[in-house]
Amino acid sequence: MLDDTIAAIATPLGQGGLAVIRLSGPQALAIADRSFLPVGKTSSQPSAAPTHTIHYGRIVRQGGTVDEVLLSVMRAPRTFTREDVVEITCHGGILAAKLVLDTVLENGARLAEPGEFTKRAFLNGRLDLAQAEAVADLIHTRTELSLAAANEQLAGKLSQRINQLREDMMKTLAHIEAHIDFPDEDIAPDTREQLLSRLEGGVAFMDELLRTANEGQILRRGIRAAIIGRPNTGKSSLLNQLLGHDRAIVSPIAGTTRDTIEETANIRGLPVVFVDTAGLRAAADTLEQEGIRRSRETVARAELILHVFDVSEPFTSEDENYMTQFAHKKRILVRNKVDLPQRLELPSEVGRDVLIAPRRAGDSPPYQSIVDVCALTGQGVEALKDSIKDLVWAGEIKAGMLQVMINSRHQDALRRAREATLRTLEALRGDLTLELVALDLRIAVNAVGEIVGKTTTEDLLDSIFSQFCIGK
Ligand SMILES: Nc1nc2c(ncn2[C@@H]2O[C@H](COP(=O)(O)OP(=O)(O)OP(=O)(O)O)[C@@H](O)[C@H]2O)c(=O)[nH]1
Ligand SMILES: [Mg+2]
């Protein structure tokens, strides 16, 4: 498949100043020759151009000029795909970019599939699989913290550790297999101890990596935080404060918010999707009922709940309902409208001392934190942001591990590797035949190898690269 030449528009479709059409493959220069007419003394035919040079000229198609462009020539192997690459920068209209693409397709290129450039980079050994995934993370990243993590992964920080782990395990495997070949020789007791402790070290390291999965997930996908509470307590006002702009309609009328409103904010480096909801009250009309149904669904999917109280109003049974619902989730109690005279008296069990109390099933709600705010002025909102970060970011991760936060695919592979390694340990301790020991260890080595793409299947590659956009 790598003997054809692929092409795609690498910039977003739409109107912009510039657009880039990318070509990669053995015919990239020849196809560029057929599509490009150099203009001026310093420009040359792509096939005659030195590597890493830019040329001014025109894209011509059926005798007419399509667009005035700059064409970059990058010869293998010092390119993203390790193949010959040509990038054509044209004017950023949808039509211009499309016609340039059509021209190179007519001249012999094939339209690239999503992620195919990155896939080639992987297949040609330019990137391993974990690094290729980091490219997708870089494209989708929404905060500086996740950008930093994606860059570390792209630089190979995770891959280095995974490769080290895999090599250690392969050494152990080689050792055990050597003994299979000489069945008369028993493994000496101290050698056995050594093998056991090396495998145990491997499991400990896998555990350390697995602990980063949750935070890795948070950095990549963000968390969902639902804002719930009685009508008119100031939920929409709070959303606007957290976002820093007026997203939701605020009014003194109870039942203002009918539909759920979602928007992402950067909270101390974490992408948090805040969801403002319609109050879950015993509904008046059918429209509001629908809003309430959606609210319920949203809240059910959220990892974190901000339960908003209006401190100028007495505690009601409605508030109590909210307390008992979704009690298994992480919750922050937000006391809003602290600028007004206070009439709210929370039930005694919502004292600050219950915050650290263990939760029992059927318990009323321990909140993990209580924050006073005024959503009108923004007072207390920074403290609320701190509180959100502290709750979702466990803080158990050592600073160095920020470089190696694993994603759910890595997590799945590591779990399988861990289980197989534990079986290996058991078999070795229990004096089972070395064939059995080696069998499980090989499963573990392969699972670890999946993370960096040392062991892959076509299905796995498809599922990873199909998540990319076309042109990447
Ligand atoms: N004094 C005071 N008023 C506030 C504060 N926060 C919100 N309000 C007012 O309370 C009213 C209701 O605010 P919203 O943000 O619309 O409340 P909500 O919870 O989204 O209401 P629904 O969408 O109807 O459920 C508005 O008139 C706000 O201006 C606050 O901290 N202090
Ligand atoms: Mg509202």
Image (cartoon, rainbow, N blue to C red):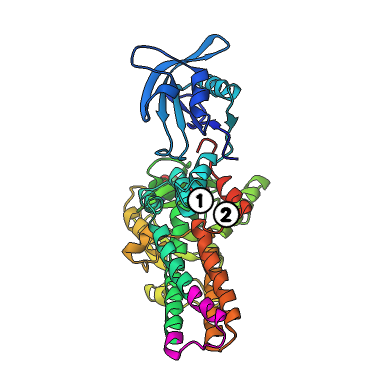
- Residue denoted by label 1: 275
Q: Would residue 174 be counted in the magenta stretch?
A: yes
- Residue denoted by label 2: 298
Given residues 257 and 22, the one toward you in this image is 22
Q: CA distance from mark 2 to mark 1?
A: 8 Å
Image quadrant holding the N terminus, namely: top right
Prevailing secondary structure class for the magenta stretch in the rendered image? helix
Instruction: Decide: is 309 above or below 113.
Output: below
Identify the amino acid type marked 2. Thr
Q: Residue furthest top?
A: 63
* Residue 15, image x, y percentages: 48, 24
Instruction: Decide: is 465 above or below 13.
Output: below
Query: Secondary structure under badge 1?
Result: strand
The total of numbered circles placed on residues is 2
Identify the amino acid type marked 1. Val
* Residue 438, image x, y percentages: 56, 76
* Residue 337, image x, y percentages: 38, 54
Q: Residue at x 45, y 29 (%)?
A: 86
* Residue 381, image x, y percentages: 34, 53
Q: Residue at x 31, y 52 (%)?
A: 379
* Residue 152 visible in this rendered orientation of the protein: yes
Instruction: Decide: is 249 above or below 398.
Output: above
In the shown orientation, is residue 431 left or right of residue 191?
Answer: right
Please give the range of residues in magenta: 173-192
Whether residues under marks 2 and 1 lie with C-beta atoms below 8 angstroms apart, the answer is: yes
Q: Residue at x 60, y 56 (%)?
A: 296
Query: Secondary structure under badge 2?
Result: helix
Given residues 110 and 288, the one toward you in this image is 110
Mark 2 / mark 1, whichever is N-terminal: 1
Q: Residues within 10 Å of mark 2 (few under 14, many from 20)?
A: many
Given residues 402 and 308, the one toward you in this image is 402
* Residue 236 visible in this rendered orientation of the protein: no
